[in-house]
Image: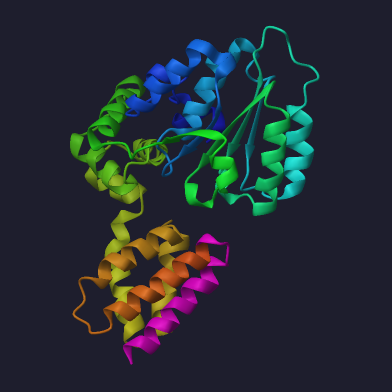
Amino acid sequence: MTESTMWVEKYRPAKLSAIVNQKEIVGSLKSLLKNTSEMPHLLFSGSAGVGKTTTALCLAKEILGDSWREYTLELNASDERGINMVRDRVKKFARFSGLDTKIPFKLVILDEADEMTSDAQTALRRIIEDTARHCRFIMIANNISKIIEPLQSRCAVFKFTRIAEDDIVGYLEEICKKEKIRYGKDGLKTIYTYSEGDMRHSINILQATASIGIVNEDNVKTSAGLARTNDVAEILKLSLAGKISEARNKMIELIKVYGMSESDFLKYLNEECYKLKTTHLSEILESIAKYDYRLIIGANPEIQLSALLAELGHIGK
């Protein structure tokens, strides 16, 4: 599957008016567009897949027109999170030279800005001040608390909400009709349940499910890795019983053979804990939370999940 055939890109809104669900934010941004020269720097926050990056790109197209690619710098700050990225790429692009007189300003979109180091954010603050006349910044963050206060105070902050079930199901229905694929409402609702309001994830699951047949509940569960969630309960029981090797083998099978992600494995493991009749619930939950954090900061998934199973074995003794 090439990027050009990905439905998440094919059906990405190109105009602010097509953004799903975020009506108040879209209304506020349209008001700002009435006088673009006075538009402030922007900070978009909210969970994944709710339209932050799409909204930023729609703004770029509406402000800069056909020249938006030439005068927009889009960076994923989690890939280049240090001060060198700010000094080299951002500073070089944001300088005045090369600005068309018909263009109000250049635009820098910093996706996942909350992953930037504090030093990089501090350096960015100075660049924002020095280039304010001819450059605007749109920072995008899942966790706004990780953006330093001096940067937050220089931006108009917009907090994106999780997309409602009806909105996601309705949008998925539109895609199904355009792609001429068979679907059932139960399948689309199952996609929503699994994606938890993440539109990007929902569309990816829809495309994966459509590739194996009708979009119904069973096929959605198969394509999304949900069909094996019962195995998570068995892994938990084996671990608590001290059968670490058996538990690990099943875990590896779930992840490498059936395609369940490490984060989903922890999510389902967490859910299964509440079904257990155990006096060690708080200890188990603390362990899961600890290893979830380790995965987020980039530790090796297989090593960390194996260590979690071993820790559950100690708790179960």
Side of 274 where 308 appears, left or right: right
Residue drawn where x is 32% and y is 29% of the image: 21
Name the residue: 45% across, 26% down.
12
Q: Is residue 143 visible?
A: no
Asked where in the image residue 100 lies, by quadrant, the reply is top right
Q: Is residue 95 visible?
A: yes
Residue 255 vs residue 269, the one in the foreground: 269
Compared to residue 267, the image places residue 105 above or below, namely above
Q: Main secondary structure of the magenta part?
A: helix
Q: Is residue 299 magenta?
A: yes
* Quarter holding residue 240: bottom left
Image quadrant assignment for residue 99: top right
Count all numbered tags in the image, as a single digit. 0
- Whether residue 190 sits left or right of residue 66 in the image: it is left
User: Residue 288: x and y, percent?
Assistant: 39, 71
**263 vs 15, nearest the viewer:** 15
Decide whether residue 34 is among the magenta residues. no
Q: How is the image coloured?
A: rainbow
Which of these two is toward me, 117 or 122? 122
Image location of residue 72, percent across then percent down: 65, 24
Rendered location of residue 170, percent (x, y): 26, 28
- Left of 239 or right of it: where is 214? left
Q: Position of residue 215 (x, y in %)?
A: 27, 37
Q: Quadrant of the C terminus?
A: bottom left
Magenta span: 296-317
Q: Vertical placement of 81 versus 186: above or below?
A: below
Residue 9, above or below 141 = above
Q: Residue at x 39, y 17 (%)?
A: 17
